[in-house]
Image: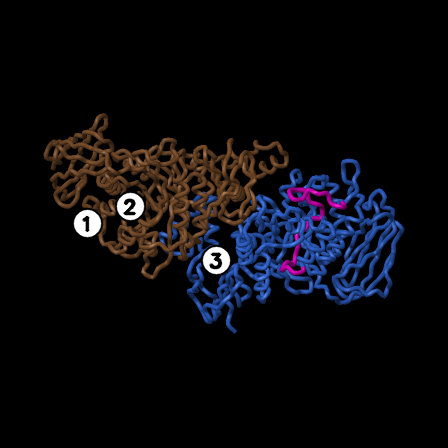
Chain colours: A brown, B blue
Amino acid sequence: MHIPADAVIERWTPIELVFDADTTRSWVDVDVTVIFRSGTIANTVAGFGSGEGTVLVRFAPPETGEWTWDARTPDGATSGRFSCVEGTSRGPVRVAAGGAHFDYADGTPYRPFGTTLYAWTHQDEGVRAQTLHTLAASPFNKVRMCVFPKGMVYNTDDPEFFPFEREGESWNVHRPVAAFWDGLDERLRELDALEVEADLILLHPYDVWGLATLTYEDCLVYLRYCVARLAAHRNVWWSLANEYDMVFGRGNEEWRAFGELISSIDPAAHLLSVHNWLTLWDASLPWVTHCSIQSQAVHDVAEWRTRWGKPVIVDEYGYEGDIVEPWGHLSGFELVHRTWCIVASGGYATHGETYYRDDQVLWWAKGGSLRGEAPMRFAFLRELVEGFRQPLTPRAANAVLNPNGTDDTFLTQLITAFEEADPLVRERVRAELTPYESTAGDDVVLRYLGRSCQAVLDWELPAGEFRIDVIDVWRMTRRTVLPTAAGAVRVPLPAIEGTAVLAVRLP
Amino acid sequence: MHIPADAVIERWTPIELVFDADTTRSWVDVDVTVIFRSGTIANTVAGFGSGEGTVLVRFAPPETGEWTWDARTPDGATSGRFSCVEGTSRGPVRVAAGGAHFDYADGTPYRPFGTTLYAWTHQDEGVRAQTLHTLAASPFNKVRMCVFPKGMVYNTDDPEFFPFEREGESWNVHRPVAAFWDGLDERLRELDALEVEADLILLHPYDVWGLATLTYEDCLVYLRYCVARLAAHRNVWWSLANEYDMVFGRGNEEWRAFGELISSIDPAAHLLSVHNWLTLWDASLPWVTHCSIQSQAVHDVAEWRTRWGKPVIVDEYGYEGDIVEPWGHLSGFELVHRTWCIVASGGYATHGETYYRDDQVLWWAKGGSLRGEAPMRFAFLRELVEGFRQPLTPRAANAVLNPNGTDDTFLTQLITAFEEADPLVRERVRAELTPYESTAGDDVVLRYLGRSCQAVLDWELPAGEFRIDVIDVWRMTRRTVLPTAAGAVRVPLPAIEGTAVLAVRLP
């Protein structure tokens, strides 16, 4: 199938080529590949089966200008052309220059403030509509969501559709179910309309249907399908797994092969990460674009940034809620507190909420409505962060533990003894001493004091004059305590948990 | 010097024998030893120098009945007798039968609810009087206090008296300063009048006068003096060191020798412990009567009890206050929360308060007045615990991490993976899963839910019928939620931080 030669496509908006093909046995057998060219760009895109007798090729042009395409199909070669013009889309989110933050492809900054909606796409239309309504009014601009349905506590229902046809006791990954994938396409478009990124979890362990235990080969087919079908969506991110190390029986070499595959075939080069349970994924691998971390060690964020030189998103650090599971009954304050620790360390944080409901529609998995106290504090924090001209970068982390920083003998002995102490003790001390402090360009310094109730902060400012504001992260207030400050200052504080201090350079 | 043969002494009340002796060079040179005998008891007590020309011998008879004493002095042998009758004193606190708790020598239970007053004895009379006034109205029945003055932040003044005479740049431990030691005697009596135990810290690292760096031999002289002079005080406990591992240059073999010495010469066999900084002292040593621990790992209390089979007092886990030091700016809630974790694990907890004052009279060191929100919650907790007929013993700690407790394959895989994870991660998960739960005899079960905001607790009760109360540890309320409960129960909760659940057996 062709599109008219005078077609005009908006940048980062998918076009779809449709080819007749016999996909009865497997869409994989049908070799349809299209090369899209413009200037020096040449993107090779594979087709994917959708329904009976057709193979589709999708492509979202990343640049304006004249494009041509050349298709190789079982029926022979075919080709066409179209024009691409600027539209309203800002394009996919990517790692920004500098390596620790994100922006849209058009250069607009993007600061992730995500939430968790693992199985929202598998709920009925009413719940989905409510979820979108809630999202629209929320501060969240990213959603962590699974492609596959979710089978675990509070998630025991079969979904309306499965991704593949059943064949006896197994899934036939060669025969995708059109209704399932059409629905997922629609969900991604719904999120995009809200300017919400979709951090798509491709594989996960919460399963009662045998989808977590697909064979390695079946996974490759499935992942190829995901990329061929979904990569043209502007707002897709690939999260190779949720809790990869809880998918028992799947070795790290398989995860590496999956990551390499996606990275090599995705024409849009979407963000790609692996979310962990107990053991952080090795983010030094070249195809890993950023760290997607589960950990409560929020004092490690600055170190992770340094270790990998990539953006850090702490995608799981407990949820606000009241369920019995330890990960799901944090107070709103505790979640907000951890969030500030992460953000003030130059990282990003993903919200989750798990208040029990008799209908089992818990936000974290199914969506619906939010009732927690944290979301409005995420909004407050997002507004603050987006008000900075630059993203946050950790400032002098752990300087307090530097034995070279002092010529005091007793202090040197303290630090030496600390370095030789039991690792668990050292970790506790380190967690206690790590400052949550960062700069945004040269005009902002942010320090979050966590649960400290200290009455003053003795602070060394960068050169120049600053105004010092004190922020109450829970009551969402900000007031100036020192209109003019320079050098070493003593900042008076309210001496309560959840206090942040902000230095803003005076003009 | 003799006491009249018809003297009548109350049990556990010190008598003092005074002998003339030349102590000019050293009281140690003057060999005065008295053996006190009654029935099969024979206690050998050494004399100590006090002022010029006298050596004193003090003894508090531990049993009623007729006593004789035989003194060996430089002037020859001498002897005497007295009667001992029951008085009002309950005697020294000791480890109770069973090994994990305390009682007074008369068998009355003693549950430590201590506070920290490191240098209160070194303050002027006005501050000391205020301290005693505050203590009298407080829930605290034990004080951690240093013999030596304290030199560190917020404690920079020289004390009025030092324990020894100066000799050039050194201290002459052979020449104690009478005014210093007379004052300490008086302070111990003042505490005893309030029924407050004195956990006497014999050595510590916070020092600007050279008292932390006494030679090993000088320490032995000093410790002998402490025992000879102070052991007759009913309410003395020996804390060999505060933060022994911060006294740089003092090896563990020296601490062991000190502990063995005290244990071998103390006729009253007072409680004896060593308080740590980073590395817990080895409480398996036979002369260690109980664990005096500094740690924030309050989830370890039940394990420490099991490891050593001795009472556990967490003597330092942060202080309520507003100073800049991380150990001194906990919120009142945080301190109370940690306290409940400790007590509900079958341990004991020592309070401390560090609100800054311009006069530098911070409670934790100098005393004065309390202003925190924690003390009244300590009173609430103490009243609860003292209302139980038996002390608290941990119940089924860590059962949740037992891989033999399930035949669920996925759960077994989870636990196995957890066991193989990085120790720091394992520790975090363990801290999150450890239940703060204990029983008091067979009629009380206490579970503290910490910061969990869970809305229900699914709980397995011991055999029999119970009433279930829910306690708000901060608001200090207690209300019955299930008047009658048995077996596996679901307890409704207020879903806020700081909730405890109490099961009381129905009559």
Q: Which residues are magenta?
A: B136-161
Pointer 2 indicates a residue of which chain? A
Query: Looking at numbered disc 3 in the image, what kind of residue is underneath it?
Result: Leu
Circle 1 packing at 10 Å, graded few (<14), some (14-19), many (20+), is some
Q: Which residue is mark 1?
A: A179
Residue B297 in the image: x percent, y percent? 53, 49
Task: Look at the picture and state if B98 lies above or below A199.
Answer: below
Q: Is residue A442 left or right of residue A260?
A: right
SS type, badge 1? helix
Q: Quadrant of the N terminus of chain A?
A: top left
* Mark toward the viewer: 3 or 2: 2
Pinpoint residue B479: horizontal percent, then vertical percent.
49, 67
* Residue A321 among magenta residues: no
The residue labelled by disc 3 is B449
Magenta-highlighted stretch: main secondary structure?
A: loop
- Visible residue check, residue A288: no
- Label of residue A194 in the image: 2
Q: Is residue A109 above or below residue B389?
A: above
